[in-house]
Amino acid sequence: MFDQDNLDRYGYRQELARQLRFRDLLAYGLVYMVPIAPMAIFGSVYGGSGGMVALAYAIGVVALVFTAFSYAQMVKAFPMSGSVYNYAGRGISPPVGFLAGWVILLDYVLVPGLLYLVASVAMHTTVPAVPVWLWLLGFVAVNTVVNSVGIRMTAVVTRVMLIGELIVLTVFLAVAGWALASGKGRFSWAAFYNADTFTWSLVAGAVSIAVLSFLGFDGISMLAEETKGGSRQIGRAMAAVLILAGVLFIAQTWLAAMLVPDPASLLAEGDPNGTAFYDAAAVAGGGWLATVCAVATAIAWGLPNSMVAQVATSRLLYAMARDRQLPAFLAKVSIRRNVPINATLLTGAVSLALGLYMATRSDGITLLSSLINFGAMVAFLVLHVSVVVHHLIRERSGNWWAHLVMPAAGFVILVWVVVNANIAAQRLGLAWLTLGIIVLVGLYLSGRRPALSGLAPAQPQARHVERV
């Protein structure tokens, strides 16, 4: 079991409370991924894949299984918060770790803002009397309070929310299945393969959109310092969450694809209002099912999903700050609640500001989605390289399957997805990486060269706590 002594090896103290069990990690990962996530972006993936929406999600599962395997290898080597930031920094070098952390910040910092925005816009559509900004403020306030109370409270709330999401999904699957059996829609395997529209580049582009639904399984690694049972629990939970969510994603999108009222129009005109899934639900069960799915999706993104996203983001900020690669105040931990309180509050404030700004842009949701996916994919690429460098080259591992074949396969698949991703996302993502390089140069010039405790002559790590 990884305990105080294991963190001491790296010059850190055990400041966060180890309260999470496997079932908590499973609930956390599923809530982060949102079992009903495809409902919100079904139309975009359907159009981008030429109708082969289930194939896009199936390829996404395969691609990220390799990534989950690489995460499991690295979390066993370095059982601490920080995810790819720590794995690349310790597995390759601290400067690479800084840049990996900087890139994944693009994912982690933007994700809560995107979730709050999508949920607020959806709720405003359902209840027009309440403006988007007020929904945003309410979602951010609730989640920040819950996360500030402690990780146990977050775990309890997310489990309750997860049960609600699974009930809604079960209802949809049952009603849609019955509708198809009763002659509604059209039974077809076209959602998996359509010879008239299939091209590898088309599917790759759709996968780059569908991956948004999978982001979150990696957030489990951020809880390595708050988990009972050690890194083995982290690896098991990540694999279980990814496969389970993948099956649910494929099932619901396949059924919805067979119930789309006008497939040709959806392919030609897209889904500008984001209602394609709900239109399919209306065909299956009527307006009540469409409303239930729409409201459930909005609440899922606005509360439990953004809640756990805020947790993951705050742990990344905390990990980088205690290594002096971000402002030190972000490394302060509440001694009574055992949470990085300043990082939690800052994440809430940034999410609110970002959500309010993006709500004024017509392309706000699309822009955020593209940037988040690009940041995550690049970080995953660095993760695979970290496995090879650390285990195969440095540790001279003889396990070529786990430390070369698996990460290499994951790397190749992700390169294929990134190359076929949205061009605007590629440009903005590279601009963000360039800014990170400039910041890294600034750290060197100011005498704050990136260094991780336990790798080099380490500076004593002060315990940052704050009574609240």
Image (cartoon, rainbow, N blue to C red):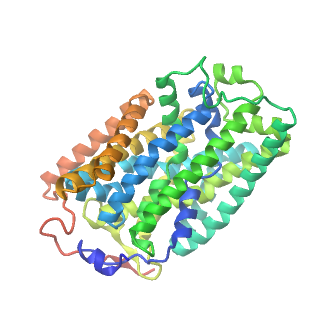
Question: Residue 101 at x, y = what percent?
Answer: 32, 52
Question: Residue 255 at x, y = what percent?
Answer: 72, 38
Q: How many numbered callouts?
A: 0
- Above or below for 62 versus 49: below
In the image, 114 versus 360, the foreground residue is 114
Answer with left or right where residue 131 lies relative to residue 341: right
Q: Which image quarter is the C terminus in?
A: bottom left
In the image, 114 versus 234, the foreground residue is 234
Determine the residue positioned at 51% across, 37% down. Answer: 59
Task: Tell me the quarter of the picture where residue 312 sits.
Answer: bottom left
Question: Residue 415 at x, y = what percent?
Answer: 36, 35
Residue farthest along the top direction in this orientation:
196
- Above or below for 208 versus 146: above
- Residue 388 seen in the current view: yes
Answer with left or right where residue 129 lies relative to residue 318: right
Residue farthest along the right direction in this orientation:
182
Determine the residue positioned at 61% across, 33% down. Answer: 53
- Residue 314 seen in the current view: no
Determine the residue positioned at 54% across, 56% down. Answer: 241
Question: Residue 222 at x, y = what percent?
Answer: 41, 62
- Above or below for 426 versus 100: above
Task: Tell me the quarter of the picture where residue 93 sits.
Answer: bottom left
Answer with left or right where residue 382 lies relative to residue 57: left
Q: Which image quarter is the N terminus in?
A: bottom left
